[in-house]
């Protein structure tokens, strides 16, 4: 890689890291009291897929350890936002689904963060964002660990 390409790569990742940090901070402040970004992420995924997932599948989806996911799931279960049930065929495995209260919490969180997201989209312009998304998706897929 040439020095010019390395500078470009460093600038790209610097901007990505800064944007990620700023977005997380702004969204965290906008979420309903007591909800963390990790909670919202799990609830949002479960609401979108409308199906059960194992804790291991969720950990892989969010690129976190099983221990970290177990902690997040325990908090969500305590809040009544998810149901965790045993696998009837394999007692070592569990399944996670979103509860009606979890769906309402996810919807409330979406309502609280959408004004921030909509303002960002409006200020950048929909056409520019549509052009940027494929590049970001390809970058993400190249960075994902191979299984």
Image (cartoon, rainbow, N blue to C red):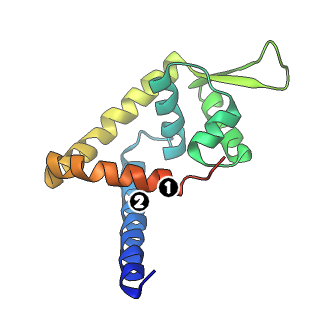
Q: Residues within 10 Å of mark 2 (few under 14, many from 20)?
A: few
Towards the viewer: 12 or 79? 12
Is mark 1 in CB contact (under 8 Å) with mark 2? no
Q: Residue at x 42, y 62 (%)?
A: 21
Q: Give left or right: position of 62 versus 55.
A: left
The residue identified by callout 1 is 142
Pinpoint residue 108: horizontal percent, then vertical percent: 37, 30
Q: Quadrant of residue 62?
A: top right
Q: Residue furthest top?
A: 88
Q: Residue at x 16, y 45 (%)?
A: 126
**24 lies above or below 88:** below
Closer to the chain start, of discs 1 and 2, is 2
Q: Residues within 10 Å of mark 1 (few under 14, many from 20)?
A: few
Q: CA distance from mark 1 to mark 2?
A: 18 Å
Pinpoint residue 10: horizontal percent, then vertical percent: 42, 77
Q: Secondary structure at mark 2?
A: helix
The residue identified by callout 2 is 20
Pinpoint residue 28: horizontal percent, then vertical percent: 42, 50
Q: What is the count of numbered marks?
A: 2
Towards the viewer: 124 or 74? 124
**82 lies above or below 29:** above
Q: Quadrant of residue 58?
A: top right
Q: Give left or right: position of 48 versus 133.
A: right
Q: Residue at x 51, y 41 (%)?
A: 34
């Amino acid at each position: 890689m040439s020095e010019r390409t390395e500078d470009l790569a460093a600038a790209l990742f610097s901007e990505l890291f800064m944007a990620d940090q700023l977005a997380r901070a702004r969204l965290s402040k906008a979420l309903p009291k007591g909800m963390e970004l990790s909670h919202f992420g799990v609830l949002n995924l479960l609401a979108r897929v409308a199906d059960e997932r194992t804790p291991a599948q969720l950990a892989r989806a969010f690129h976190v350890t099983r221990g970290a996911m177990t902690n997040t799931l325990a908090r969500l279960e305590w809040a009544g936002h998810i149901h965790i049930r045993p696998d009837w065929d394999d007692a070592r495995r569990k399944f996670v689904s979103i509860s009606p209260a979890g769906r309402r919490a996810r919807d409330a969180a979406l309502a609280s963060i959408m004004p921030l997201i909509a303002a960002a989209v409006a200020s950048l312009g929909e056409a520019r964002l549509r052009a940027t998304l494929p590049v970001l998706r390809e970058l993400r897929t190249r960075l994902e660990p191979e299984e």
